[in-house]
Amino acid sequence: MSLLSQSPETRNEQAKPKSPVATAAPRKINLNAMMVEGRALIALLLIVIVFASLSPHYLSPDNLIIMTRHVAMNAILAIGMLMVILNGGIDLSVGSTVGLSGVVAGMLLDGLQISSLNVLAYPSVWVVILISLAVGTLVGYVNGVLVSRLNVAPFVATLGMLYIARGIALLITNGTPFSNLRGDEALGNTGFLAFLKAAPLGLPMPVWAMIGFAAAFAILLNKAPFGRWLYATGGNERAAELSGVPIKRVQTRVYVLSGLCAAAVGLLLTGDLSSATPRAGEFFELNAIAAVVIGGAALSGGRGTIRGTLIGAFVIGFLVDGLVLIGVSQFWQQIIKGAVIIVAVALDQMQQRLQQRRAAKAALASSSGPDPAPAAAQP
Amino acid sequence: MPAETGTGVVLRAIDITKRYGATQALKGVNFEVRRGKVTVLFGENGAGKSTLMKVLAGVEGPTTGHLELDGERIELRSPNEAVDHGISIIHQELNLCPNLSVRDNIFIGREKRRSFGSIDYASERDVVRKLMARLEEDIDPDTPVSDLRLGQQQIVEIARALAMDARILIMDEPTSALSAAEVEVLFKVIMDLTDNGVAIVYISHHLEEAIEISDHAVVFRDGELVATADAADIDLSWVVGKMVGRAADYDFRGEEREYGEVVLSVENLKVVDPAGAGRLAVDDVSLTVKQGEIVCLYGLMGAGRTELVEALAGRLPIAGGTVRLDGDDLAGTSIAQRIGRGIGLVPEDRQRDGLVQSLSVGKNLSLASLFATTKNFFLSRGPETRRITDEISDVRVKTSGPGAAITSLSGGNQQKVVIGKMLLTDPKVLLLDEPTRGIDVGAKGEIFSLLYREARRGLAVLYVTSEIGEAITASHRVVVMAKGRVVREFDPYTTTREEIMTASGESEAGQHPIGALE
């Protein structure tokens, strides 16, 4: 299947776990999915309409690109976070991983001191990128092993890793950012910033990265057995295990994927700031969780989609940037953002209850329905 | 309705209808509950029994019609109001907090208080001890419910209802997880209650058991009360006949008795009890199952049957002995690898271990066999959907389609999905733990005829049951377990129920199987 068919597929995937009533025809499922996701989408439209009417600049192409660029980083983190949340876990360490992977990139570009050999190594830009991604992936792997093999609660394992990764980033930099990321022609390590600041077809690199990550993860969720395993373990781990799903491997892997996403954001952010600072990415995990939750995912696992998560990230990004644009104070921004998150989840809960009630009715109907001759009067 | 009104009627439901959207769950039911009598409700799933009980217990209000208590019209707006009127219910599903102790669960919401409002643990503990003595169960009041086996949890549920001192006690499937010995104790308690004037309404899928306890039988079908009779005038075939509207064939065996090679062979298997205490749940068990053979594993709760099949499936570790599938030692293989080699388990608790509630019917069906339709790392939707739709019609799941929510199915159809899921893995050996728990007679028959069809194609089946009728009518061979050991094997064609029950230790009714093990 080509990428183009991804969107309807996602929609389909979306509807099935949530579909309250038995619907066989895909058209009907789409309708249901629209209703489920509609909430976040309506919120996004409202945000756009309100801010567009308040500020003529809001919908200008330039501003749209700037806002989307802001959205992109959170969206990538949120995609990784979605993997973990679908599994029923949480990853609090992604913000720190963003900082750590950026710092690792900065360090490598600055020249890697290998004291035992007394040499300074300057890896090429591609090696730098690969190593940074590997570092984020490794952080995720450690999280995954802690959670799946040592049975540490996800909240605790990743909370610990939040401090540890940040601490390592601070140790590497000694607290001061690497700001020389240009490289040296003679050493052959130039082009790092140029690559991250490139804007093919007018779209900045983070936006391309978001599109790439979203497509790849949507395929993973909807087309690969891993995706089905993930939805199954999040929905009922015991049943999944008895069905032969390698639940431990799935659990480890979601943290690895989340770490990979965080590392990618670390690189993009470093490119954005033109400097690798150890404090980069602080509190990013909270925005990522918010995007996933607004996008209709259940924190208990098993329910959520890439599409919803993207919409969630856009809701947050477009809201905050809009508030900034029309000059709402920082303090009010926080309050409004918080309110949007709570309202989104409260509505989601109401909808869940409604669906459960409908499913209960359907169960009743199906258990008393099948007998073809119910009306036979009895003496 | 045969209106023997007058004597002893405490609670009367008059012309009750209940609608859920387009579905009419109850169609004008008139129903009486009598003082000091056990009224048993028979009917398949969805016949309206549970709905009527919910109306009587104030869980749901009727769409039309009303209730009369002692001849006076009452309205029940909540279960608490029903309790205030002396009506309490033991629900089909366990409603316990596993993290709290037995005592806390029994008194939850109705804690005994001392004068300053603090909880009077000592007197609560006392009441629990008395209740447990009455139920002949050796459970300490301070044990966390999570440490109890399913059967013991059901005892706690019953104790909670008893603690309310109800005048009318509704029991919806109170024995689904109880051993025969425990059921006997429960029946003694029921007699005791009725002697004291308590009215009992009793629902069970164990028909023989329900007939045994009943004073008065009522049969429901399709939301209507179709027959009433005194217990003296009824037997099993009458009940089954009224339930399904025709005389049902209660023997699933058929004639086939040709078996192939031994597929599953278990030698000296030992499994440590997962509940702890360092004792063996399965102690030196050896057995074999041949191709095409359906073997029943009969025994009391706690006899080690569930642990045995879970160890065979790879969920529990093996402490000693060997398990061979087609001659290959399964030691060290995971659940997934065993499914790949052809042995899978249909677990005891459908909701907890069998289904992923957030996935559709179709995705539940294909979950265990995704690789069959995976090409180049990706699932191919067309072939997957085809396999799913074929399986839905093959195991006869009544559903509107593969996209339907799994929670929209009735219990029997959900069980067919769990079985279909394992059949799709193309197993050589299928293990089933209490495959008919909580499902109606019609679905039971369908499930066993399905197993017999698969057995004729060479599948080896090993199923666990606590229902003696099912052991004797649905298997080619009965293996009886007690206290972790295989005590005897029987040929069901030539054995009586009594022989099998005696072998399982059921006749020593006074002893509790679980207590004895500890």
Image (cartoon, rainbow, N blue to C red):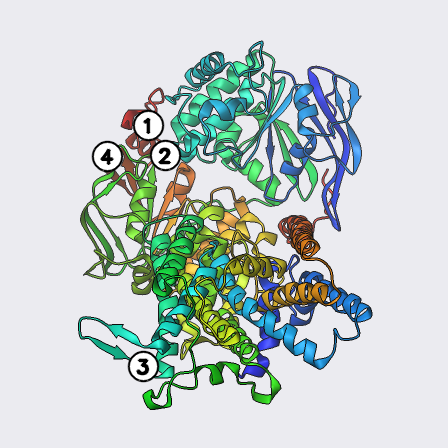
Mark 4, residue position: B278
Whether callout 4 and callout 2 share a subunit is answered yes
Residue A273 position within the rendered picture, expressed as x and y whole percent measured from the top left: 51, 73
Q: Secondary structure at mark 3?
A: loop
Question: Is residue A142 visible in this depiction of the protein?
Answer: yes
Mark 1, residue position: B513
**Mark 1 touching mark 4, by CB under 8 A?**
no
Could you give the CA–CA distance between mark 3 and mark 4, rounded to whole angstroms?
Answer: 57 Å
Amino acid under label 3? Pro
**Mark 2 touching mark 1, by CB under 8 A?**
yes
Q: Against A214, is B145 above or below? A: above
Q: Nearer the viewer, residue A364 or B47?
A: A364
* Crowd rating for badge 3 (residues with CA inside 10 Å; few <14, some 14–19, many 20+): some
Could you give the CA–CA distance between mark 2 and mark 3, rounded to whole angstroms?
Answer: 66 Å
Amino acid under label 4? Gly
Q: Nearer the viewer, mark 3 or mark 4?
A: 3
* Crowd rating for badge 1 (residues with CA inside 10 Å; few <14, some 14–19, many 20+): many
Q: Nearer the viewer, mark 2 or mark 3?
A: 3
Q: Nearer the viewer, mark 1 or mark 4?
A: 4
* Crowd rating for badge 2 (residues with CA inside 10 Å; few <14, some 14–19, many 20+): many
Question: Label 2 marks which chain's residue?
Answer: B
Whether callout 3 and callout 4 share a subunit is answered no
* Crowd rating for badge 4 (residues with CA inside 10 Å; few <14, some 14–19, many 20+): few
Amino acid under label 1? Pro
Relative side of A351 to B244, left or right: right
Q: Secondary structure at mark 2?
A: loop
Q: Nearer the viewer, mark 3 or mark 1?
A: 3
Question: Label 3 marks which chain's residue?
Answer: A
